[in-house]
Image (cartoon, grey):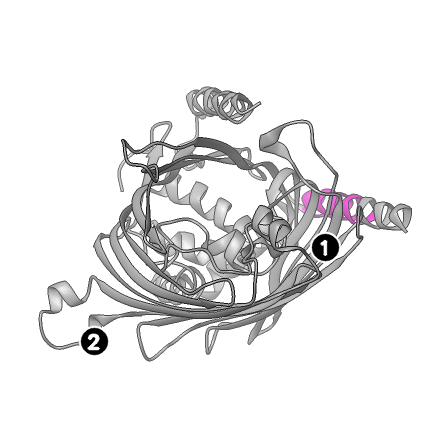
Amino acid sequence: MAVASADVFLVLFFAATMAAAQLPNADRPVPILTGTAGTFSFVTAGQQELNAQINPVLLLPLGDRWLVEGRGEFQGAFQRPPDGGPYGGPVSKNLDYVQADYIANPYVTVTIGRFLTPFGIFNERLYPIWIRSLQQDPLILPLSAESSDGLMLRGGFPANSKVNFTYAAYVSAVSTSHNNLQSDRNVGGRVSFFLPGPRVEIGASWQKLLQDARANAFGFHFAWLSTQLPLNVHSEYARSNQGSGYWIDGAYRLSQLHFWQKAMRRTEIAGRAEQFFSGSISPNGALALGLSPANAREGEFGLNYYLHDGLKVVGSYGRQFSSAGNMNLWTAGIAYRFLIPLGRVGTQ
Amino acid sequence: MKTRISILICGLALGSIVYAKSAHAEGPSGKKEASTSTVTQSYDAGAMRAQGEQRFRANCGRCHAAPQKFPPRMMATVLRHMRVRATITDDDMRLVLFYMSQ
């Protein structure tokens, strides 16, 4: 079953190289292999995990309006056994998305396939390790499906000179045949307003499960990029029958400091505060979904150093307070974003 | 309920495709061409670069650190991807592409 993601990725890769060979126009977009790679040491409640991952993304533009894209996730999580001995653990493969996008017009893009569920902003936009300012996932991330299999309509356009409106609406079918392609039967959507002047985005998401408990989930998100400071703030709130909670994080580049400017320009401090409230789900059920088994509060502080725009060294410390037990969370590692054209690109 | 949702989704999909066809019929590139033409007429290269940089910082900087510039064919692919992923508007995409490929 796990081979399916590698197979799909290989098919896309060969299609991309063949498409690149056939592109005659010097201005046409070229297929690209991009993605992230990283290695981290997570120490959670004294238990160390060595994590190595590579997440290739294949972008295959076709004509003026099509884009076929996919992302695989290959991850090894290694721990030392309690009784000693060498590190060991599972290597997992997952297909996060493989989708065909058709840009029908300036207002509508039709997406079909397996896609990242547009619920909030973290799952779709902040998840890659080179983008996120802190490597730990927010506590509320598992409250909505990470991937869905089906059809989606989405787009963004100016509502007036000061506001952009964006939307996404989708329907997903249940899929249980492959471990890598599992999805629930659900519908949902997201709307948001972006104010380019103050660089503020606010939005709301909704998801309705059309199976089992037929539960609703909803959430709100907020993003702000300061015009005065090198400061970036994101926040989400989500609620479902499995729980509810929020997180808010900020990342500040030290580029305004007047000493050690070469180093300070590359240094970023980040912090996150979050809280999770358990819903109508058993502790074991919550753990199986990746949720905290009990109410929890968490604070985290991190330091990132950008060696260049696609390569950063990260470190963070967090403390979780929970009725299931308090714990420290340490993270150290390196995240890299690569970008390789699969065809001739000419010169800059 | 599910039938109504299915009909709604199919209707929206068909509507968008029909709209795209009609827009395409207006010219070789339809709305896109009109939009490009409007943008090109409205700004000279310097102003377009400034607008592109402004929109690049506002749209891209909301999620990640500013990447370096890449060759135009690569930028065209990356921006098509980001148009879908981050629901960047048509005009923003064109101006950012102009700025990033200069």
| Principal secondary structure, stretch drawn in magenta | helix
Horizontal and vertical percent position of residue A154: 65, 52
Q: Which of B41 and A343 is in front in this view?
A: A343
Q: Residue tagged by mark 1? A: A188
Quadrant for the C terminus of chain A, please. Answer: top left
Helix or strand or loop: what does disc 2 sit on? helix
Q: Nearer the viewer, residue A51 or A144?
A: A51
The reply to whether residue B56 is in sight is yes
Nearer the observer: mark 1 or 2; the answer is 1
| Kind of residue at disc 2 | Gln
Asked if the residue at tag 2 contacts the one at tag 1, i.e. Cβ–Cβ closer than 8 Å, the answer is no
Residue in the image at 75% along x and 60% along y = A216
Residue in the image at 12% along x and 77% along y = A258
Indicate which disc, 1 or 2, sits on the residue closer to the N terminus.
Answer: 1
Residue A256's disc number: 2
Horizontal and vertical percent position of residue A174: 74, 38
Span highlighted in magenta in the image: B11-26
Horizontal and vertical percent position of residue A298: 44, 68
> Mark 2, chain letter?
A
